[in-house]
Every structure is written in structure tokens, then in C-alpha cells.
């Protein structure tokens, strides 16, 4: 398992978001194809930097396909939905959850089939088209019959607005299926588990949760984004309520549910002049699972992105999840013992020996410390996690020398410009302009004012010019190479666990 952790951490340090533009040939393919986009490229990078490093019998350099991931018992035929319940050792089933922009329904990729699961379609109210699921051998092309794992994962993780929808063409007549993040329809993927008649739910909800906003934006875009976030949060609450009702009605046997804000306090805001204010202080400085509350809040706010994650960020998240899962399992066991059940929680040995060699365990004592601690390791950890909530310019906030160079460069260029103006001020002040030149200047100024408006009237047409796409392909390639080669390297070195642990 330690080897899996090291392989995974190496993979998430590759900055897949930027690597998606680091191949000039792929860039031109993305801008010239209607069915191959950035999400497909990300899927290929998943395979190259994550799945390609798994040590098994799969041939190196060959993409993994969904049908190849089907797990079958050695003897006889097997139907997971109808036979898994009677097995002591359950057969794992892979189910990747996405959302179809065509119909608004969930779209699943499993090792057997892809399409809209029939058990999740609410036909009494929803009258949109149903895109029938099909087994891979029924697909009309060889490419679809051997659909790539990386593409399915990219569709499942394709956050709308950040990544383009993943397109599947040639599957349904006259239609191009376009898929986005499964969280748009089913944030935890629990519906798919219930549809498979699962009765033990283990849910680790890693989705970004809505934050508080003391002064919400009144701009059109700000209101739209905030409203979308509220809708997503509402869906999340409804899904959790569904599984809780399953426990109460005995349709579910047990529920294991953790998330990044688990056991964090929910502050109460009193009105001005309140006579009986709710108490705000005195809460335990650490969570029940042993993580300082301020640290856990920072972990809950960390970006959900595909850029580079440092060792400190990765291991801090792992330790939080490890501690949280351990506490939750012990709580479930204690509850079952009080109800007179068996010693272990179901068939799980909660007290199994622990691995003392987990690479994230050295952070355990540091992540208990209060934010006012003078321990330099705690101060540096808090800084790294605070910066980790941002998407851009993280390394500038972590490396003072880089900030200084940026300031010096900016000031130097400004002084150079002012010097040039001072030297040539007589020419500038004596500049004469003809009527023709004035007309051209006015025309260019008006064009500069109205051209953005024309783009808003028809943004798709304006964005599809070959010149602009070529510039994006070339400049994106150059910028990504510079970012990965210089700034990513600085960020990862700054976030080394060994560096943090040796601070004094």
C-alpha cells in the first residue's frame, strides 16, 4: 500500500491541468476536432501518469479499457446485482458516474456497459429522452467496444466551466453525447450504489463544499455562480438524507459517511443588539479524530483541481482521511456493540494491526497543534494549506525570492518606460496629427470598444477563427512548458515533507 501512495503522489505532482496544453500536436488536434477535446487529453494523461504505473500484467503503453476491468469469479456465470449478496467475499464492481448534458440524466460507465441506468429514470415527472444503456460488445465501433478508462474518468471529473464536456459520437443516430462531472446530478454517486441493491454504503465525500460568504457578490456572474453552488449543496444534502432514511427504514444495513468538514463546528451569527447571543467560544480545538480545527478547515477549503499537489498537501489530506476513517469505524463498532451485535462491526476488524510506516504519519503531532503555536513546522504547514486553497500564483506566495524578483522586474520596466518618455518628451509634446490619422485613431478606438460587444453577441463564431485557435495552441504550449519547467518545480520543492519536518 505504501508503494501505491508513493505512485499516486508522484502522479498528482504532474500538474495535469497544465500538461494538457504541453503537447503542440495534441493542441492542434483539440482545436481542429469536434469530438476530441481537453477532457479526452486529460483522460490520456490519467492513463500515462497514474494508471500506467500500476504494476500488473497489463502491457505498458497500452490504454486500459472498461471491459478489461470486469472481475469474474473463476467458476460459473456471475451477476453482481443478483448474486453478490449471497457471497462472503463480495466481487468488486467499478461504476463511474457522469452526467449527460443531452438529457440531464446520470450516465454510468461500468466494466460491462455504458449509458443511462434504467433504474434511475423518474418517468412519472421526467419526460426527456432516455439514452439506453448498451453492453460494450453491442457498440457500433471497435473504439466504443473498447472504451478507454481514462476517457470515462475524465468525463466523471469534468467540472463544468473548467473542462469541456467529453463527447461521444457515433453511438446514437443524429446525437453526440456530451458528458460532464457526475456531481451535477448525483454528487456522491450513491444513487448508482442503491440501484445495484447495495446495503452497506461506504461514502467518502471529497467534493468541494460551499463556503460562507459574509458579503455575496451582486454582479450577474457572481450571483449565478453562488446560486449554482447553493443548488449543488442542496443536492448533496438531499442525497445524504436519502441514505439516512434508508437506515431508518432498514433498506440499508449500515452507513459509513465522511467528508472534509466532518465534525467541524457550525458558527451561529447573532444579530446586532441580540440579548441572548449564542456562545461562540470554548469549543474543543481539535476534532474528535485528532486534527486541529483550523487545519481541518484549511483542508476543507483546499482546491479541487488538477494542478500539482505538493507532498505536504497530499500527506495532510491523507492523514486527515486516515484519522477520520479510523474514528468513524470505531464509532460504528461502539454503536453496534451497544445494540447487542457481534464484536466486530459486521465483518470488519476495526482493531486490525496498523501500519506504522505510512509516509503521512510524521504529520500527526504537527496537525494537532493550535494555530497560535510557535512551532515553525505548524506555522509553515498553516501557510502552505492556506495558499493551497488558491488556483493561481501559489508559488509566488510561498517563495519570497520569487516575489522580490517579480517586484524588481515590474519596477524596473516601469522606470525604463518613464525614462524613455522623459528622453523623448520633446518629440511626444510636439507630435502633430493629420485629419486622416485622427480618423484612423477614432476608428480603431471605436473598434476596440465595440468588438468585445460583437464577440458577446456571437461568442462561438468569434472564438472559432483559425488564427485565434492557432495562437491559443502555440501560446498555451509555450506557457505550459515554462510553468511546468520553472514554477511547478519551485512549488514542489517548497512543499517537500522533509523540508517541513526539519524546520526549527
Image: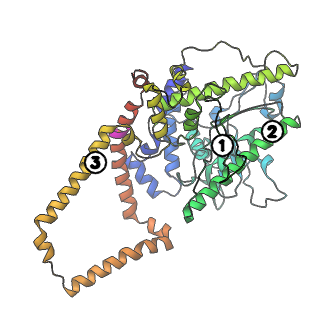
The numbered mark at residue 238 is none
Residue 192: image location, x then y, percent: 74, 41
Split into 4 quadrants, where in the image is the N terminus? Answer: top right
Instruction: Name the residue carrying label 3.
Output: 407
Task: Let me know if residue 59 appears in the view.
Answer: no
How many marks do you count on the picture? 3
Instruction: Name the residue carrying label 2.
Output: 244
Please tell me whether mark 2 or mark 1 is closer to you in this view: 1
Q: Which residues are magenta?
A: 485-489
Instruction: Name the residue carrying label 1.
Output: 267
Magenta residues, dominant SS class: helix
Looking at the rendered structure, the secondary structure element under dot 1 is loop
Please tell me whether mark 2 or mark 3 is closer to you in this view: 3
Asked if residue 414 lies left or right of residue 197, the reply is left
For label 2, the crowd category at 10 Å Cα-Cα, with few meaning under 14, some 14 to 19 and many 20 or more, is: some
Residue most extreme to the top: 353
Q: Check whether the beta carbons of the residues at disc 1 and disc 3 lie within 8 A of each other.
A: no
Residue 405: image location, x then y, percent: 27, 43
CA gap between label 2 and label 3 equals 54 Å
Please tell me whether mark 1 or mark 3 is closer to you in this view: 1
Residue 273: image location, x then y, percent: 67, 53
Asked if residue 500 lies left or right of residue 173, the reply is left
In front: 499, or 400?
400
Q: Earlier in the sequence, mark 2 or mark 1?
A: 2
Amino acid at each position: 500500500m505504501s508503494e501505491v501512495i508513493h505512485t499516486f503522489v508522484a502522479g498528482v505532482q504532474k500538474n495535469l491541468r497544465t500538461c494538457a496544453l504541453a503537447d503542440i500536436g495534441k493542441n492542434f488536434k483539440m482545436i481542429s476536432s469536434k469530438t476530441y477535446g481537453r477532457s479526452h487529453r486529460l483522460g490520456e494523461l490519467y492513463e500515462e501518469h497514474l494508471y500506467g504505473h500500476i504494476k500488473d500484467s497489463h502491457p505498458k503503453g497500452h490504454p486500459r479499457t472498461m471491459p478489461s476491468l470486469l472481475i469474474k469469479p473463476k467458476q460459473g456465470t456471475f451477476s453482481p446485482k443478483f448474486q453478490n449478496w449471497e457471497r462472503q467475499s463480495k466481487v468488486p464492481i467499478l461504476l463511474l458516474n457522469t452526467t449527460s448534458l443531452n438529457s440531464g440524466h446520470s450516465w454510468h460507465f461500468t466494466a460491462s456497459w455504458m449509458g443511462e441506468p434504467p433504474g434511475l429514470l423518474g418517468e412519472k415527472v421526467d419526460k426527456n429522452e432516455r439514452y439506453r444503456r448498451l453492453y460494450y460488445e453491442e457498440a457500433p465501433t471497435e473504439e466504443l467496444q473498447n472504451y478507454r478508462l481514462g476517457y470515462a474518468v475524465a468525463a466523471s471529473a469534468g467540472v463544468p466551466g473548467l473542462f469541456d464536456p467529453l463527447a461521444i459520437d457515433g453511438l446514437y443516430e443524429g446525437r453526440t453525447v456530451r458528458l460532464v462531472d457526475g456531481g451535477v446530478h448525483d454528487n456522491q454517486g450513491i444513487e448508482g450504489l442503491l440501484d445495484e441493491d447495495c446495503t452497506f454504503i461506504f461514502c467518502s465525500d471529497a467534493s468541494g463544499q460551499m463556503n460562507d460568504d459574509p458579503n455575496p457578490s451582486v454582479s450577474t456572474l457572481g450571483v449565478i455562480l453562488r446560486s449554482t453552488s447553493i443548488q449543488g449543496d442542496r443536492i448533496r444534502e438531499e442525497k445524504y438524507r436519502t441514505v439516512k432514511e434508508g437506515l431508518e427504514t432498514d433498506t440499508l444495513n449500515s452507513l459509513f459517511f465522511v467528508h472534509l468538514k466532518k465534525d467541524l463546528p457550525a458558527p451561529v451569527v447573532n444579530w446586532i443588539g441580540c440579548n441572548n447571543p449564542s456562545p461562540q467560544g470554548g469549543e474543543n480545538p481539535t476534532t474528535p479524530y485528532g486534527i486541529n480545527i483550523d487545519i481541518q478547515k484549511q483542508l476543507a477549503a483546499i482546491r479541487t483541481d488538477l494542478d500539482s499537489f505538493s507532498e505536504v498537501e497530499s500527506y495532510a489530506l491523507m492523514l486527515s482521511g486516515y484519522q477520520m476513517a479510523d474514528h468513524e469505524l470505531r464509532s460504528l463498532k461502539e454503536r453496534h456493540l451497544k445494540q447487542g451485535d457481534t464484536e466486530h462491526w459486521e465483518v470488519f476488524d476495526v482493531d486490525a494491526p496498523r501500519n506504522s510506516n505510512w509516509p503521512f504519519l510524521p504529520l500527526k503531532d504537527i496537525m494537532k497543534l493550535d494555530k497560535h503555536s510557535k512551532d515553525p513546522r505548524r506555522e509553515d504547514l498553516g501557510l502552505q494549506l492556506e495558499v493551497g486553497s488558491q488556483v493561481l500564483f501559489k508559488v509566488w506566495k510561498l517563495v519570497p525570492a520569487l516575489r522580490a524578483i517579480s517586484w524588481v522586474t515590474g519596477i524596473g520596466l516601469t522606470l525604463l518606460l518613464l525614462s524613455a518618455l522623459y528622453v523623448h518628451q520633446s518629440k511626444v509634446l510636439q507630435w502633430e496629427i493629420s485629419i486622416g490619422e485622427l480618423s484612423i485613431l477614432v476608428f480603431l478606438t471605436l473598434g476596440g470598444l465595440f468588438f468585445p460587444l460583437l464577440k458577446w453577441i456571437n461568442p462561438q463564431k468569434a472564438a472559432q477563427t483559425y488564427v485565434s485557435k492557432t495562437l491559443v495552441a502555440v501560446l498555451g504550449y509555450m506557457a505550459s512548458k515554462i510553468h511546468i519547467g520553472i514554477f511547478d518545480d519551485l512549488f514542489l520543492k517548497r512543499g517537500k515533507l522533509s523540508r517541513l519536518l526539519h524546520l526549527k
